[in-house]
Amino acid sequence: MMSLNMFLAIPGGTSIILIVVVVLLLFGGRKIPELMRGLGSGIKEFKDATKDDEAKKVEKE
C-alpha cells in the first residue's frame, strides 16, 4: 500500500503517462484541442477580470 501512495504522490514519468492515457480514453483525441481552447479562453477571461478589478480599486483610492 505504501508504494501505491508514493506512486500517486510524486508526479513522475510513469504517472504522467498514466494520466495522459486516461484523458485520451475519456475524451478521445479529437475532443482534447477543443477542451484546451476552452480552458485557455477561460484563463484569459479570468486574468482580464482580475486586471479590471485591480484598476477599479486604484481609481477608488
Image (tube, grey):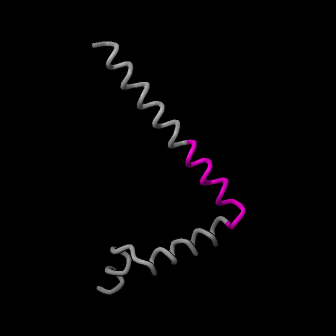
The answer to whether residue 37 is magenta is yes
Please, is residue 42 above or below residue 1 in the view? above
The answer to whether residue 21 is magenta is no
The residue that appears at 34% across and 74% down in the rendered structure is 10
**x, y percentage for residue 55?**
38, 21
The residue that appears at 56% across and 49% down in the rendered structure is 39
The residue that appears at 50% across and 43% down in the rendered structure is 43
Q: What stretch of residues is rendered in magenta?
A: 28-41
**x, y percentage for residue 46?**
47, 37
- Position of 27 with respect to 12 (left or right) is right
- Position of 37 with respect to 3 (left or right) is right
Please identify the quadrant where the C terminus is shown. Answer: top left
The residue that appears at 38% across and 76% down in the rendered structure is 8
- Position of 54 with respect to 31 (left or right) is left
* The image quarter in which residue 11 lies: bottom left
Please, is residue 8 above or below residue 50 in the view? below
Please, is residue 46 above or below residue 30 in the view? above
Please identify the quadrant where the N terminus is shown. Answer: bottom left
Please name whichever residue, 24 or 33, is drawn nearer the observer in this view of the structure: 33
Please name whichever residue, 36 or 5, is drawn nearer the observer in this view of the structure: 36
How many numbered marks have been drawn onto this rendered protein structure? Answer: 0
- Residue ranking furthest to the right: 30
- Residue ranking furthest to the top: 60
Please name whichever residue, 5 or 32, is drawn nearer the observer in this view of the structure: 32
Per the picture, the main secondary structure of the magenta-coloured stretch is helix
**x, y percentage for residue 35?**
62, 54
